[in-house]
Image (cartoon, grey):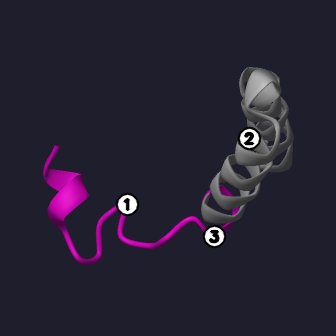
């Protein structure tokens, strides 16, 4: 937990890919609410593949 609050810790930087994926998925989910769950799932898969 301490790493979350350190200015130079493991979690100090913003993950730009995560922010972009979140904004895109949220925008698409608002367009088609009935399919929001699958849009979020696809965004998560794309994000995970790009970070591994």
Q: Give the residues drawn in magenta, as a range.
A: 1-18
Residue 20: % across, % down: 70, 64
Closer to us: 39 or 46: 39
Along the horizontal axis of the image, is 38 left or right of 15? right
Q: Which residue is label 3 attached to?
A: 16
- Which mark is nearer the camera, 2 or 1? 2
The picture places residue 37, in percent across and down from the top left corner, at 72, 22
Observer-nearest residue: 14 or 23? 23
Q: Label 3: few (<14), some or many (≥20) within 10 Å?
A: few
Tag 2, which secondary structure? helix
Frontmost of labels 3 and 1 is: 3
Distance from the alpha carbon under mark 3 to that under mark 1: 13 Å
Which residue is rendered at x = 74% and y = 41% of the image? 29
Tell us which disc is closer to us: 3 or 2: 2
- Mark 3 and mark 2: Cα distance apart in space: 20 Å
Was residue 5 drawn as part of the magenta stretch in this picture? yes
Give residue 11's mark.
1
* Side of 52 relative to 23 (left or right): right
| Residue occupied by mark 2 | 29
Query: Mark 3 or mark 2: which comes first in sequence?
Result: 3
């Amino acid at each position: 937990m301490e790493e979350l609050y350190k200015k130079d810790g493991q979690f100090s930087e913003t993950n730009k890919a995560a922010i972009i994926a979140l904004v895109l998925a949220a925008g698409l989910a608002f367009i088609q609410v009935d399919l929001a769950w699958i849009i979020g799932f696809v965004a998560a898969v794309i994000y995970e593949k790009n970070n591994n």
